[in-house]
Image: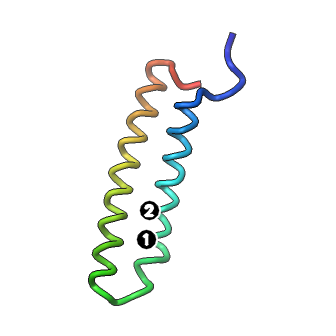
C-alpha cells in the first residue's frame, strides 16, 4: 500500500533543492546588482556557484531515487 505522505528523505531533498534554487535566483536577480564592490561581487558569485553545484547534486539524487522507485 502506497503512503499518502512523502518519505522524509524525499521531502528533505525537494525542500533543499527549492531553497538552493531560490538562493541562486536571488543572488543573480537582486544581490549582484546592489554594489560595485569587487570583493562583494566575488563573494556572491562564489556563493552562487556553490549553490549551482548543490542544485545539480540534489537533482541527481532525486533522479536516482525516481529511477530506483524510491521517490514517493
Circle 1 Cα neighbour tier, 10 Å, few/some/many (<14 / 14–19 / ≥20): some
- SS assignment at label 2: helix
Question: Which residue is pictured at 58% across the width and 36% down the height?
Answer: 11
Question: Which residue is pictured at 43% across the width and 31% down the height?
Answer: 63
In the depicted structure, whether residue 60 falls above or below residue 39: above
Locate residue 34, reporting x and y percent: 44, 85
Question: Which residue is pictured at 50% across the width and 18% down the height?
Answer: 69
Locate residue 9, reporting x and y percent: 52, 31
Asked whether the beta carbons under mark 2 and mark 1 sit within 8 Å of each other, the answer is: yes
Residue topped by disc 1? 28
Which numbered marker is on residue 24? 2
Which numbered marker is on residue 68? none
In the depicted structure, whether residue 45 falls above or below residue 10: below
CA separation in Å, label 2 and label 1: 6 Å
Along the line of sight, the residue nearer the viewer: 23 or 66: 23
Question: Which residue is pictured at 46% across the width and 26% down the height?
Answer: 65
Image check: 11 left or right of 36? Answer: right
Along the line of sight, the residue nearer the viewer: 66 or 1: 1
Locate residue 70, reporting x and y percent: 51, 21
Quadrant where the N terminus is found in the figure: top right
Q: Residue furthest bottom?
A: 36
Q: Residue furthest right?
A: 4
The number of callouts visible is 2
Along the line of sight, the residue nearer the viewer: 12 or 68: 12
In the depicted structure, whether residue 30 falls above or below residue 57: below
Quadrant where the C terminus is found in the figure: top right
> How has the structure been colored for display?
rainbow
In the depicted structure, whether residue 58 falls above or below residue 66: below
- SS assignment at label 1: helix
Q: Quadrant of residue 37?
A: bottom left
Circle 2 Cα neighbour tier, 10 Å, few/some/many (<14 / 14–19 / ≥20): many
Amino acid at each position: 500500500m502506497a503512503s499518502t505522505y512523502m518519505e522524509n528523505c524525499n521531502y528533505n531533498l525537494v525542500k533543499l533543492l527549492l531553497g538552493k534554487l531560490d538562493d541562486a535566483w536571488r543572488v543573480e536577480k537582486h544581490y549582484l546588482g546592489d554594489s560595485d564592490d569587487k570583493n562583494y561581487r566575488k563573494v556572491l558569485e562564489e556563493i552562487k556557484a556553490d549553490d549551482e553545484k548543490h542544485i545539480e547534486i540534489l537533482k541527481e539524487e532525486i533522479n536516482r531515487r525516481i529511477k530506483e522507485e524510491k521517490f514517493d
